[in-house]
Image (cartoon, helix red, strand yellow):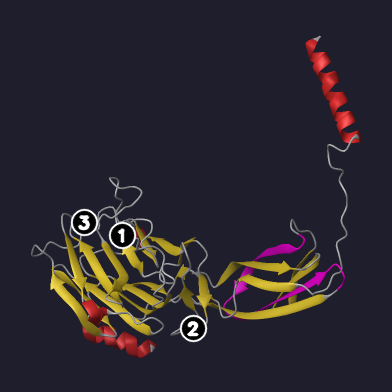
Amino acid sequence: MKLKQLLLIGMLIAAFGCKDGYIDDIKGAPQGADVTAPTITFNYPLEGTSYRVLEDIAPIDINVKVSDDIEVAEVTINLDGEDLITLNKFIDYRNAIAAYTYETLENGDHELTVTAVDGAGKTTTQSINFKKEEPYDPVYDGEMFYMPFNGDYTEQVTITKAIVSGIPQFSDDFIAGGKSYLGANDAYLTFPTNKLTLSNNFSAVFWYKCNNTPDRSGILTISAPDPAHPTAPNNRTKGLRLFRENIGGNQVVKLNVGNGTQESWFDGGATAKATPGTWIHIAFVITPTGATLYINGNVVSTGTFPVDESKIDWAGCDIMNIASGAPRFLEWAHRSDLSNYDEMRLFNKALTQAEIQAIINNED
């Protein structure tokens, strides 16, 4: 009986409440005038993207955002003069995502064209050019990793796609290839190290244009977990950490290497500075006995490990991070880097100074 009474009371409250205006009536609102034509943003591929996979014929995922002030009515995706699909149903009709997988992309140059029509019939057409290239053949002896950053986050030697954290960008300010990586807050790339040869001899080379905001950041990190400090990891007894920080008004590049029980520092001070807004070439070489850091082909720091033949210890170093100390080198706030990166290569050998200079000459 009590249940019936409660239901009756609830119905009476609802009825009188609606009648007396306690619950707002649902009223329609006019859309307003459709003033502007649709805008098109290519998410992938981008203008100048170099798409490279192991197969000569392979699928590619096309992703485009179309926006309109009132309504996106229709989006057509065209590749090399052939209409692939026309879409007219979208979850968000003002910011529509048009996605399509083209299964049989061949090597060569391609033109992707998107035509968008809004609810008033206004039309926008926009095109970009990209290229599908043959599998990469390493250029240099011992080269095991190559990231050109040409509109794609795929490593070229093993065709491994990076795990992308945050929202980094591709910049038209570059050294080679048409694009470079441009960092953003909380953005970085992660690669598994199981496709790399992590040996006693290890080298890295790349171009770098420093943004000194924030005043410190990670650059290249291959670190092991730090279970004792899960919220601010900083295990420096394994792997390596390349980073920059403000020292006396200069952005100084430093390398830290762990040999299993101890750490070694390779810090050239003012000679290892990264001038903000200027492209420089960074390289470092690790051998069984020590390491050397180079800026623009010049030695800025060199030394030996504390115990002869102690070697670098890679135990637990199962990921590599580009453009941040995250997630394993955070205690000193060396987080995401808002700088540009281009033409990054890793080697399973100790490069000589002459080899580093040859790479600079080929890319500059």
Assess disc 2: are there few (<14), some (14-19) or many (≥20) residues with their C-alpha within 10 Å of its C-alpha: some
Residue annotated with mark 3: 237
- Quarter holding the C terminus is bottom left
Q: In this rendering, would 178 be left or right of 321?
A: right
Does 109 appear in magenta? Answer: yes
Mark 1 or mark 3, which has the lower sequence index? 3
Assess disc 3: are there few (<14), some (14-19) or many (≥20) residues with their C-alpha within 10 Å of its C-alpha: many
Q: Can you tell which of label 1 and label 3 is closer to the viewer?
A: 1
> Three-letter amino acid code at disc 1?
Trp
Mark 1 vs mark 3, CA separation in Å: 16 Å
> Three-letter amino acid code at disc 2?
Asp
Is residue 212 among what the camera can see? yes
325 relative to 249, above or below = above
SS assignment at label 2: loop
181 relative to 7, above or below = below
Assess disc 1: are there few (<14), some (14-19) or many (≥20) residues with their C-alpha within 10 Å of its C-alpha: few
SS assignment at label 1: loop
Residue annotated with mark 1: 332
Is residue 351 among what the camera can see? no
Q: Residue at x 50, y 68 (%)?
A: 168
Depth order, front residue of 26/185: 26
Mark 2 vs mark 1, CA separation in Å: 30 Å
Does 120 appear in magenta? Answer: yes
Q: Are marks 1 and 3 in contact (CB under 8 Å)?
A: no
Residue 323: give x, y in percent of width and height: 40, 68
Q: Residue at x 20, y 65 (%)?
A: 200
Residue 193: give x, y in percent of width and height: 35, 60
Residue 221: give x, y in percent of width and height: 33, 63
Q: Residue at x 31, y 53 (%)?
A: 233
Q: Can you tell which of label 2 and label 1 is closer to the viewer?
A: 1
Q: Which residues are magenta?
A: 93-121
